[in-house]
C-alpha cells in the first residue's frame, strides 16, 4: 500500500512537499533546458527493462513441456492472451507484432507498478547517498511516454513499409482517405496529405498523453494522501485520527489504482496492435 506517515518537519508545507516529490533528478547536458535529462526516469526504465528481459529469459530457459510451474503457467496465459488479441486484430502476416505487443504491455505495467511503492521510501533512501530529488514512476514523466510512443510508431512505419513497400506506403499519404483519379487526384493530394499528417501526429499523442495523464494524476493523489499526516506529531490526537483516515484512503486508492495501471498498460498494448493493423492494411 502506498501511504506515508511523515513526522519530521518538511520545509514549504504541503505545497513544498508535493513540489519536492514531483521534481526529477535532472542532469543538464547543455545550457538549454531542452537538453536536460531526467536521470531518474532513464535509470528506472533501464532497470525495469533489464528486469523484464532477464526474468523472461530464465522463465523460458526453465520452461518444460510437462507440468508447468505457477510462474510458467502465468506467463503462458499472458502470452496466449496477447497472441489471441493479435490474431483477432492484426490481419497481416508478421511475427513481429505479438512480441511487440507483449513487450509494451509488460514494460508499461512494470513502470506503472512502481507507483505502488510508499511515496517516501525510495526518495528518502536516495538522500542517504546525497540524491535530493527522485521520481520512481517513469510513466508519470511526459518524456518517457512520448519517447515510448514515438518508438512504437517508428516500428509501425517499419511494419507498414514491409507490407506495402516504400512507394505504396507513402503514396497512400496523397491518395487516402479521398480517392480520386486524374485532375481530382492532384487537387485532393494536399488535403489527403494534411489529414494524414494530422493522423500521424494524433496517434503518438493519444498513446503518450493518455498514459502520462493517468499516471501523473495517480501519483499526485498518493502524495495528497501522504499529506494527511505531514508534519504530524506523535503527541497530538489529530495525528492518529488523520493517520486512520490516511490508511483507509490509501487502501482504497491503492486497490483502485491497481486497476488503473493494468488498464493503462492494456490500452497502450491494444492501441499498438490496432495501429499496426491499420499500418499494414492497404487503402
Image: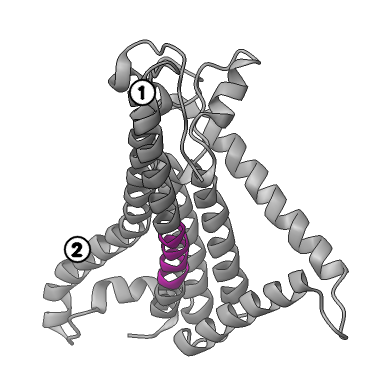
The residue lying at 76 percent from left, 58 percent from top is 55
In the visual, does 89 lie left or right of 109? left
Residue that label 2 marks: 194
Label drawn at residue 9: none
Residue that label 1 marks: 237
The residue lying at 40 percent from left, 70 percent from top is 271
Q: Give the quadrant of residue 53.
A: bottom right
Whether residue 133 appears in magenta in the rendering, the answer is: no
The one of 17 and 46 positioned closer to us in this rendering? 17
Q: Give the quadrant of residue 89.
A: bottom left
Mark 2 element type: helix
The residue lying at 29 percent from left, 57 percent from top is 201
Q: Is any atom of residue 18 visible in this view?
A: no
Give the prevailing secondary structure in the magenta stretch: helix
**Cβ–Cβ under 8 Å for marks 1 and 2:** no
Q: Which residues are magenta?
A: 258-271
User: Whole-percent x and y of residue 9?
Assistant: 42, 11
The quadrant the C terminus occupies is bottom left
Q: Residues within 10 Å of mark 1 (few under 14, many from 20)?
A: few
Judge depth for marks 1 and 2 and give the one in front: 1
The one of 108 and 198 positioned closer to us in this rendering? 108
Counting residues from the N terminus, which is met first, the one under dot 1 or under dot 2? 2
Reply above or below: 3 against 258: above
Rendered image coloring scheme: one colour
Mark 1 element type: helix
Amino acid at each position: 500500500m502506498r501511504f506515508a506517515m511523515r513526522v519530521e518537519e518538511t520545509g514549504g508545507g504541503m505545497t513544498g512537499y508535493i513540489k519536492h516529490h514531483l521534481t526529477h533528478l535532472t542532469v543538464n547536458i547543455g545550457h538549454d533546458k531542452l537538453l536536460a535529462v531526467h536521470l531518474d526516469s532513464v535509470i528506472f526504465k533501464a532497470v525495469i527493462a533489464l528486469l523484464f528481459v532477464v526474468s523472461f529469459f530464465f522463465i523460458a530457459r526453465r520452461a518444460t513441456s510437462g507440468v508447468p510451474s505457477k510462474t510458467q503457467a502465468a506467463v503462458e496465459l499472458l502470452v496466449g492472451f496477447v497472441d489471441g488479441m493479435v490474431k483477432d486484430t492484426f490481419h497481416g502476416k508478421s511475427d513481429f507484432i505479438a512480441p511487440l505487443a507483449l513487450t509494451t504491455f509488460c514494460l508499461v505495467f512494470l513502470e506503472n507498478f512502481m507507483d505502488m511503492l510508499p511515496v517516501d521510501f525510495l526518495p528518502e533512501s536516495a538522500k542517504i547517498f546525497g540524491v535530493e530529488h527522485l521520481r520512481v514512476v517513469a510513466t508519470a514523466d511526459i518524456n518517457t511516454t512520448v519517447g515510448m510512443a514515438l518508438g512504437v510508431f517508428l516500428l509501425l512505419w517499419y511494419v507498414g513499409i514491409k507490407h506495402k513497400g516504400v512507394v505504396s506506403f507513402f503514396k497512400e499519404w496523397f491518395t487516402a482517405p479521398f480517392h480520386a483519379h486524374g485532375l481530382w487526384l492532384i487537387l485532393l493530394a494536399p488535403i489527403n496529405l494534411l489529414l494524414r499528417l494530422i493522423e500521424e501526429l494524433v496517434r503518438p499523442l493519444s498513446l503518450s498523453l493518455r498514459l502520462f495523464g493517468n499516471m501523473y494524476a495517480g501519483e499526485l493523489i498518493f502524495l495528497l494522501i501522504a499529506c494527511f499526516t505531514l508534519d504530524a506529531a506523535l503527541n497530538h490526537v489529530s495525528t492518529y485520527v488523520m493517520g486512520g483516515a490516511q490508511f483507509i484512503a490509501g487502501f482504497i486508492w491503492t486497490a483502485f489504482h491497481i486497476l488503473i495501471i493494468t488498464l493503462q498498460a492494456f490500452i497502450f498494448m491494444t492501441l499498438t496492435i490496432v495501429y499496426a493493423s491499420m499500418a499494414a492494411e492497404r487503402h
